[in-house]
Amino acid sequence: MQRWLVALFFVPFVNLLFFLVLSVLPSEEVPVPRTRRGLNAFEKLLPESDTGGAIAGVLVSVVFGTLVTVVALRAFRSYGWGLFVGVPFSAGLVSSLLAARRGQRLRRCIGIACLSVTLLGLAVVAVALEGLVCVVMAAPIAYPLACLGGWVGYVIRTRPGHRVATTAGALLVVPLALPGLIGVEKLARLPEPELVLRSRIEIDAPPEIVWNKVVHFEPLPPPNDLVFLAGISYPVRAEIRGAGKGALRRCIFSTGAFIEPIEAWEEPDRLAFSVGEQPRILTELTPYREIHPPHLDDFFVSTRGEFLLTRLPGGRTRLQGTTWYRHAIWPAQYWRLWSDAIVHAIHMRVLEGIKRSSEADQVRALTRRLDPRTLSR
Protein backbone atom coordinates (compact mmCIF):
# COMPACT_ATOMS: atom_id res chain seq x y z
CA MET A 1 0.00 0.00 0.00
CA GLN A 2 1.30 3.48 -0.85
CA ARG A 3 2.26 5.42 2.30
CA TRP A 4 0.77 8.69 1.08
CA LEU A 5 -2.73 7.14 1.23
CA VAL A 6 -2.47 7.92 4.96
CA ALA A 7 -3.46 11.49 4.02
CA LEU A 8 -7.03 10.25 3.49
CA PHE A 9 -7.25 9.75 7.25
CA PHE A 10 -7.65 13.52 7.61
CA VAL A 11 -10.49 13.95 5.07
CA PRO A 12 -13.88 14.00 6.88
CA PHE A 13 -16.28 11.19 5.95
CA VAL A 14 -13.94 10.00 3.19
CA ASN A 15 -11.76 8.55 5.93
CA LEU A 16 -14.67 6.30 6.99
CA LEU A 17 -15.04 4.97 3.47
CA PHE A 18 -11.27 4.59 3.25
CA PHE A 19 -11.27 2.48 6.43
CA LEU A 20 -13.95 0.28 4.91
CA VAL A 21 -11.87 -0.17 1.77
CA LEU A 22 -8.81 -1.01 3.88
CA SER A 23 -10.83 -3.59 5.77
CA VAL A 24 -11.19 -5.70 2.64
CA LEU A 25 -7.52 -5.44 1.63
CA PRO A 26 -5.37 -8.45 2.55
CA SER A 27 -2.55 -7.74 5.00
CA GLU A 28 -0.19 -10.08 3.20
CA GLU A 29 0.09 -12.09 0.03
CA VAL A 30 -2.01 -15.24 0.34
CA PRO A 31 -2.20 -17.62 -2.56
CA VAL A 32 -5.79 -18.20 -3.53
CA PRO A 33 -6.67 -21.30 -5.57
CA ARG A 34 -8.28 -20.38 -8.89
CA THR A 35 -10.74 -23.22 -8.36
CA ARG A 36 -12.62 -21.17 -5.71
CA ARG A 37 -16.09 -20.82 -7.14
CA GLY A 38 -16.82 -17.26 -5.95
CA LEU A 39 -13.53 -15.84 -7.19
CA ASN A 40 -13.78 -17.45 -10.60
CA ALA A 41 -17.37 -16.27 -11.00
CA PHE A 42 -16.39 -12.66 -10.30
CA GLU A 43 -13.40 -12.86 -12.62
CA LYS A 44 -15.70 -13.92 -15.43
CA LEU A 45 -17.84 -10.84 -14.88
CA LEU A 46 -14.91 -8.43 -15.27
CA PRO A 47 -14.44 -7.16 -18.85
CA GLU A 48 -11.11 -8.14 -20.36
CA SER A 49 -10.62 -5.09 -22.60
CA ASP A 50 -9.80 -1.54 -21.52
CA THR A 51 -12.89 -0.22 -23.26
CA GLY A 52 -15.12 -2.82 -21.64
CA GLY A 53 -13.70 -2.02 -18.23
CA ALA A 54 -14.29 1.70 -18.73
CA ILE A 55 -17.90 1.17 -19.82
CA ALA A 56 -18.57 -1.21 -16.93
CA GLY A 57 -17.00 1.21 -14.46
CA VAL A 58 -19.10 4.14 -15.66
CA LEU A 59 -22.36 2.19 -15.76
CA VAL A 60 -21.94 0.55 -12.37
CA SER A 61 -20.91 3.80 -10.66
CA VAL A 62 -23.83 5.74 -12.20
CA VAL A 63 -26.39 3.10 -11.21
CA PHE A 64 -24.89 2.77 -7.74
CA GLY A 65 -24.72 6.56 -7.24
CA THR A 66 -28.29 7.09 -8.42
CA LEU A 67 -29.65 4.41 -6.08
CA VAL A 68 -27.77 5.84 -3.09
CA THR A 69 -29.06 9.32 -3.97
CA VAL A 70 -32.61 7.94 -4.02
CA VAL A 71 -32.03 6.48 -0.55
CA ALA A 72 -30.53 9.74 0.76
CA LEU A 73 -33.27 12.01 -0.59
CA ARG A 74 -36.37 9.86 -0.50
CA ALA A 75 -35.76 7.59 2.51
CA PHE A 76 -33.67 9.84 4.77
CA ARG A 77 -34.31 13.34 3.31
CA SER A 78 -30.64 14.01 3.97
CA TYR A 79 -28.40 16.54 2.23
CA GLY A 80 -25.22 15.79 4.09
CA TRP A 81 -21.70 14.43 3.97
CA GLY A 82 -22.89 11.06 2.73
CA LEU A 83 -24.60 12.56 -0.31
CA PHE A 84 -22.20 15.32 -1.32
CA VAL A 85 -18.91 13.70 -0.23
CA GLY A 86 -19.53 9.96 -0.04
CA VAL A 87 -21.42 9.53 -3.32
CA PRO A 88 -18.96 11.29 -5.69
CA PHE A 89 -15.94 9.74 -3.94
CA SER A 90 -17.50 6.29 -4.19
CA ALA A 91 -18.51 6.84 -7.83
CA GLY A 92 -14.89 7.63 -8.68
CA LEU A 93 -13.62 4.68 -6.64
CA VAL A 94 -16.02 2.15 -8.17
CA SER A 95 -15.46 3.27 -11.75
CA SER A 96 -11.69 3.19 -11.29
CA LEU A 97 -11.70 -0.23 -9.67
CA LEU A 98 -13.47 -1.67 -12.68
CA ALA A 99 -11.59 0.29 -15.32
CA ALA A 100 -7.99 0.21 -14.05
CA ARG A 101 -5.48 -2.21 -15.55
CA ARG A 102 -1.85 -2.84 -14.71
CA GLY A 103 0.43 -0.57 -16.74
CA GLN A 104 -2.46 1.84 -17.38
CA ARG A 105 -2.06 5.57 -16.87
CA LEU A 106 -3.62 7.25 -13.85
CA ARG A 107 -4.92 10.06 -16.08
CA ARG A 108 -7.28 7.65 -17.84
CA CYS A 109 -8.77 6.44 -14.56
CA ILE A 110 -9.26 10.02 -13.38
CA GLY A 111 -11.00 10.82 -16.66
CA ILE A 112 -13.33 7.85 -16.23
CA ALA A 113 -14.10 8.95 -12.66
CA CYS A 114 -15.00 12.46 -13.90
CA LEU A 115 -17.16 11.02 -16.68
CA SER A 116 -18.95 8.85 -14.11
CA VAL A 117 -19.82 11.75 -11.83
CA THR A 118 -20.95 13.83 -14.85
CA LEU A 119 -23.33 11.13 -16.02
CA LEU A 120 -24.45 10.59 -12.43
CA GLY A 121 -25.46 14.25 -12.20
CA LEU A 122 -27.41 13.98 -15.45
CA ALA A 123 -29.07 10.78 -14.21
CA VAL A 124 -30.18 12.53 -11.01
CA VAL A 125 -31.83 15.22 -13.15
CA ALA A 126 -33.28 12.65 -15.57
CA VAL A 127 -35.06 10.66 -12.83
CA ALA A 128 -36.46 13.88 -11.30
CA LEU A 129 -34.50 13.66 -8.04
CA GLU A 130 -33.03 17.15 -8.39
CA GLY A 131 -32.95 20.11 -10.74
CA LEU A 132 -30.03 21.18 -12.88
CA VAL A 133 -29.18 24.21 -10.70
CA CYS A 134 -28.52 22.08 -7.61
CA VAL A 135 -26.42 19.60 -9.59
CA VAL A 136 -24.29 22.43 -11.00
CA MET A 137 -23.84 23.87 -7.51
CA ALA A 138 -22.60 20.50 -6.26
CA ALA A 139 -20.13 20.07 -9.14
CA PRO A 140 -17.18 22.04 -7.64
CA ILE A 141 -17.05 19.66 -4.69
CA ALA A 142 -18.09 16.51 -6.57
CA TYR A 143 -15.36 16.50 -9.22
CA PRO A 144 -12.35 16.72 -6.84
CA LEU A 145 -13.85 13.97 -4.69
CA ALA A 146 -14.48 11.79 -7.75
CA CYS A 147 -10.86 12.30 -8.80
CA LEU A 148 -9.74 11.34 -5.30
CA GLY A 149 -11.85 8.19 -5.45
CA GLY A 150 -10.50 7.42 -8.92
CA TRP A 151 -6.95 7.75 -7.65
CA VAL A 152 -7.62 5.44 -4.68
CA GLY A 153 -9.20 2.85 -6.96
CA TYR A 154 -6.24 3.09 -9.35
CA VAL A 155 -3.73 2.57 -6.51
CA ILE A 156 -5.67 -0.43 -5.16
CA ARG A 157 -6.09 -2.06 -8.56
CA THR A 158 -2.55 -1.54 -9.90
CA ARG A 159 -0.49 -2.16 -6.78
CA PRO A 160 1.86 -5.17 -6.79
CA GLY A 161 0.23 -8.35 -5.53
CA HIS A 162 -3.30 -7.13 -6.21
CA ARG A 163 -5.90 -9.89 -6.26
CA VAL A 164 -9.31 -9.77 -7.91
CA ALA A 165 -10.88 -10.62 -4.55
CA THR A 166 -9.75 -7.22 -3.29
CA THR A 167 -11.71 -5.45 -6.02
CA ALA A 168 -14.73 -7.67 -5.41
CA GLY A 169 -14.64 -6.91 -1.68
CA ALA A 170 -14.41 -3.15 -2.23
CA LEU A 171 -17.27 -3.21 -4.75
CA LEU A 172 -19.44 -5.04 -2.21
CA VAL A 173 -18.52 -3.05 0.90
CA VAL A 174 -18.88 0.50 -0.45
CA PRO A 175 -22.44 0.22 -1.85
CA LEU A 176 -23.63 -1.54 1.30
CA ALA A 177 -21.89 0.79 3.75
CA LEU A 178 -22.70 4.20 2.25
CA PRO A 179 -26.50 4.12 2.79
CA GLY A 180 -25.86 3.01 6.37
CA LEU A 181 -23.48 5.90 6.94
CA ILE A 182 -26.08 8.32 5.53
CA GLY A 183 -28.64 6.89 7.93
CA VAL A 184 -26.29 7.31 10.89
CA GLU A 185 -25.61 10.89 9.83
CA LYS A 186 -29.36 11.58 9.69
CA LEU A 187 -29.89 10.12 13.16
CA ALA A 188 -26.99 12.18 14.54
CA ARG A 189 -28.91 15.40 13.68
CA LEU A 190 -25.98 17.65 12.90
CA PRO A 191 -26.35 21.17 14.34
CA GLU A 192 -27.68 23.93 12.09
CA PRO A 193 -25.91 27.12 13.17
CA GLU A 194 -27.58 30.46 12.46
CA LEU A 195 -25.64 32.27 9.75
CA VAL A 196 -25.60 36.00 9.12
CA LEU A 197 -24.83 38.04 6.00
CA ARG A 198 -24.59 41.83 5.70
CA SER A 199 -24.59 43.91 2.53
CA ARG A 200 -24.40 47.69 2.28
CA ILE A 201 -24.68 50.52 -0.20
CA GLU A 202 -24.32 54.30 -0.08
CA ILE A 203 -27.19 56.48 -1.32
CA ASP A 204 -27.19 60.14 -2.36
CA ALA A 205 -30.28 60.93 -0.32
CA PRO A 206 -30.96 61.58 3.40
CA PRO A 207 -32.30 58.84 5.71
CA GLU A 208 -35.75 60.44 5.83
CA ILE A 209 -36.23 59.73 2.10
CA VAL A 210 -34.52 56.34 2.16
CA TRP A 211 -36.64 55.15 5.10
CA ASN A 212 -39.88 55.32 3.12
CA LYS A 213 -38.35 53.22 0.34
CA VAL A 214 -37.10 50.63 2.84
CA VAL A 215 -40.49 50.17 4.43
CA HIS A 216 -42.32 49.97 1.12
CA PHE A 217 -40.03 49.71 -1.90
CA GLU A 218 -41.47 50.08 -5.36
CA PRO A 219 -41.68 47.25 -7.94
CA LEU A 220 -38.24 46.28 -9.18
CA PRO A 221 -37.43 45.74 -12.87
CA PRO A 222 -37.03 42.20 -14.23
CA PRO A 223 -33.65 40.74 -13.18
CA ASN A 224 -30.72 40.24 -15.51
CA ASP A 225 -28.43 38.53 -12.99
CA LEU A 226 -27.53 34.97 -13.95
CA VAL A 227 -28.32 33.69 -10.45
CA PHE A 228 -31.96 34.77 -10.82
CA LEU A 229 -32.28 33.75 -14.45
CA ALA A 230 -31.18 30.26 -13.35
CA GLY A 231 -34.27 29.94 -11.15
CA ILE A 232 -33.33 31.41 -7.76
CA SER A 233 -36.28 33.28 -6.24
CA TYR A 234 -35.88 37.07 -6.37
CA PRO A 235 -37.62 40.05 -4.69
CA VAL A 236 -40.20 42.00 -6.71
CA ARG A 237 -41.67 44.58 -4.30
CA ALA A 238 -42.53 45.19 -0.64
CA GLU A 239 -45.72 46.36 1.00
CA ILE A 240 -46.71 46.98 4.61
CA ARG A 241 -49.84 47.03 6.71
CA GLY A 242 -49.75 49.41 9.64
CA ALA A 243 -46.79 51.29 11.10
CA GLY A 244 -44.50 50.82 14.06
CA LYS A 245 -43.73 47.67 15.98
CA GLY A 246 -46.30 44.98 15.23
CA ALA A 247 -46.91 46.10 11.63
CA LEU A 248 -46.87 43.37 8.99
CA ARG A 249 -44.51 43.68 6.05
CA ARG A 250 -44.84 41.49 2.97
CA CYS A 251 -41.79 41.17 0.75
CA ILE A 252 -43.06 39.74 -2.51
CA PHE A 253 -40.69 37.35 -4.30
CA SER A 254 -41.02 35.67 -7.67
CA THR A 255 -42.20 32.47 -5.95
CA GLY A 256 -44.41 33.99 -3.25
CA ALA A 257 -44.29 36.28 -0.23
CA PHE A 258 -42.08 36.53 2.86
CA ILE A 259 -44.32 37.44 5.82
CA GLU A 260 -42.28 39.72 8.07
CA PRO A 261 -43.74 40.93 11.41
CA ILE A 262 -41.97 44.16 12.42
CA GLU A 263 -39.92 43.77 15.62
CA ALA A 264 -38.22 47.20 15.72
CA TRP A 265 -39.38 50.48 14.12
CA GLU A 266 -36.81 53.20 14.83
CA GLU A 267 -37.57 55.75 12.12
CA PRO A 268 -35.44 56.71 10.22
CA ASP A 269 -32.55 54.61 11.56
CA ARG A 270 -33.50 50.96 11.92
CA LEU A 271 -36.15 48.52 10.77
CA ALA A 272 -35.98 44.95 12.08
CA PHE A 273 -38.33 42.05 11.48
CA SER A 274 -38.73 38.33 11.98
CA VAL A 275 -39.79 35.92 9.24
CA GLY A 276 -43.10 34.20 9.84
CA GLU A 277 -43.48 32.50 6.47
CA GLN A 278 -41.36 32.16 3.37
CA PRO A 279 -41.91 30.83 -0.16
CA ARG A 280 -39.73 28.21 -1.86
CA ILE A 281 -36.23 29.42 -2.56
CA LEU A 282 -36.03 28.49 -6.23
CA THR A 283 -37.79 27.14 -9.26
CA GLU A 284 -35.90 24.05 -10.42
CA LEU A 285 -34.56 23.83 -13.97
CA THR A 286 -35.84 20.43 -15.03
CA PRO A 287 -37.12 18.71 -18.18
CA TYR A 288 -40.30 17.90 -16.27
CA ARG A 289 -43.23 20.20 -15.67
CA GLU A 290 -42.42 20.45 -11.98
CA ILE A 291 -40.40 18.62 -9.33
CA HIS A 292 -40.29 19.12 -5.59
CA PRO A 293 -37.01 17.87 -4.07
CA PRO A 294 -36.86 17.80 -0.25
CA HIS A 295 -34.48 20.77 0.02
CA LEU A 296 -37.33 23.11 -0.96
CA ASP A 297 -38.90 22.40 2.46
CA ASP A 298 -37.12 23.76 5.53
CA PHE A 299 -33.56 23.14 4.36
CA PHE A 300 -32.92 26.86 3.80
CA VAL A 301 -34.78 29.06 6.30
CA SER A 302 -34.56 32.82 6.74
CA THR A 303 -35.22 33.63 10.41
CA ARG A 304 -34.97 37.44 10.65
CA GLY A 305 -33.74 40.56 8.91
CA GLU A 306 -32.77 44.16 9.48
CA PHE A 307 -32.22 47.43 7.63
CA LEU A 308 -29.82 49.89 9.25
CA LEU A 309 -29.63 53.49 7.98
CA THR A 310 -26.58 55.59 8.88
CA ARG A 311 -26.52 59.33 8.16
CA LEU A 312 -23.44 60.44 6.21
CA PRO A 313 -22.06 63.91 5.51
CA GLY A 314 -23.55 65.79 2.56
CA GLY A 315 -27.09 64.50 3.03
CA ARG A 316 -26.15 60.93 2.14
CA THR A 317 -27.09 57.56 3.72
CA ARG A 318 -25.33 54.25 4.20
CA LEU A 319 -27.96 51.52 3.98
CA GLN A 320 -27.09 48.08 5.37
CA GLY A 321 -29.25 45.01 4.91
CA THR A 322 -28.75 41.98 7.16
CA THR A 323 -30.26 38.51 6.94
CA TRP A 324 -30.02 35.77 9.56
CA TYR A 325 -30.64 32.30 8.19
CA ARG A 326 -29.82 28.62 8.62
CA HIS A 327 -29.50 25.68 6.26
CA ALA A 328 -29.42 21.93 6.81
CA ILE A 329 -26.98 21.05 4.03
CA TRP A 330 -23.45 19.78 4.57
CA PRO A 331 -20.50 20.24 4.26
CA ALA A 332 -21.81 23.47 5.78
CA GLN A 333 -18.79 25.64 4.94
CA TYR A 334 -18.94 24.68 1.27
CA TRP A 335 -22.67 25.28 0.92
CA ARG A 336 -22.39 28.55 2.82
CA LEU A 337 -20.34 29.90 -0.08
CA TRP A 338 -23.38 29.40 -2.30
CA SER A 339 -26.01 30.52 0.21
CA ASP A 340 -24.07 33.68 1.10
CA ALA A 341 -23.66 34.53 -2.58
CA ILE A 342 -27.40 34.05 -3.19
CA VAL A 343 -28.43 36.09 -0.14
CA HIS A 344 -26.00 38.84 -1.13
CA ALA A 345 -27.45 38.93 -4.66
CA ILE A 346 -30.94 39.28 -3.15
CA HIS A 347 -29.71 42.04 -0.83
CA MET A 348 -28.09 43.99 -3.64
CA ARG A 349 -31.16 43.75 -5.86
CA VAL A 350 -33.22 45.34 -3.07
CA LEU A 351 -30.57 47.86 -2.00
CA GLU A 352 -29.88 49.03 -5.54
CA GLY A 353 -33.62 49.38 -6.16
CA ILE A 354 -33.97 51.48 -2.99
CA LYS A 355 -30.96 53.56 -4.07
CA ARG A 356 -32.41 54.33 -7.51
CA SER A 357 -35.80 55.22 -6.13
CA SER A 358 -34.46 57.30 -3.22
CA GLU A 359 -32.05 59.26 -5.40
CA ALA A 360 -34.83 59.94 -7.93
CA ASP A 361 -37.01 61.32 -5.12
CA GLN A 362 -34.10 63.42 -3.88
CA VAL A 363 -33.56 64.89 -7.35
CA ARG A 364 -37.26 65.72 -7.64
CA ALA A 365 -37.22 67.36 -4.20
CA LEU A 366 -34.19 69.48 -5.12
CA THR A 367 -35.74 70.41 -8.45
CA ARG A 368 -38.92 71.61 -6.79
CA ARG A 369 -36.87 73.56 -4.26
CA LEU A 370 -34.90 75.34 -6.99
CA ASP A 371 -37.82 75.88 -9.38
CA PRO A 372 -38.30 79.67 -9.78
CA ARG A 373 -42.05 79.23 -9.78
CA THR A 374 -41.76 77.50 -6.41
CA LEU A 375 -39.47 80.23 -5.09
CA SER A 376 -41.86 82.98 -6.24
CA ARG A 377 -44.61 81.46 -4.17
Image (spheres, helix red, strand yellow):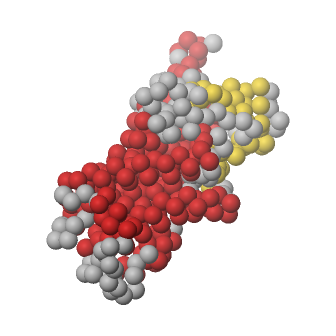
Tell me what residue is drawn at x 47 percent, y 27 percent: 288
Residue 70 position within the rendered picture, expressed as x and y whole percent measured from the top left:
53, 46
Q: Position of residue 109 (x, y in %)?
A: 25, 62
Q: Quadrant of the N terminus?
A: bottom left
Residue 361 lies, with reference to residue 115, above or below; the image says above
Residue ranking furthest to the right: 246
Image quarter hosting the C terminus: top right
Q: Please tell me how many numbered marks the rendered image carries.
A: 0
**Residue 130 in view (yes/no):** yes
Give the answer, above or below, for where 357 lies relative to 96. Answer: above
Query: What residue is at 56 percent from the left and 49 percent from the top?
Result: 71
The quarter of the picture where residue 29 lies is bottom left
Q: Nearer the viewer, residue 235 or 370?
A: 235
In the displayed structure image, the side of residue 76 where residue 246 appears, left or right = right
Q: Quadrant of residue 92?
A: bottom left
Q: Please tell me which residue lies in front, 125 or 273.
A: 125
Question: Relative to the observer, which residue lies in front, 242 or 196?
Answer: 196
Residue 6 spot, x, y in % from top left: 40, 81
Residue 341 visible in the displayed image: no
Q: Residue at x 56, y 51 (%)?
A: 72
Asked if residue 261 is positioned above or below residue 327 in the image, the reply reads above
Q: Residue at x 40, y 45 (%)?
A: 121
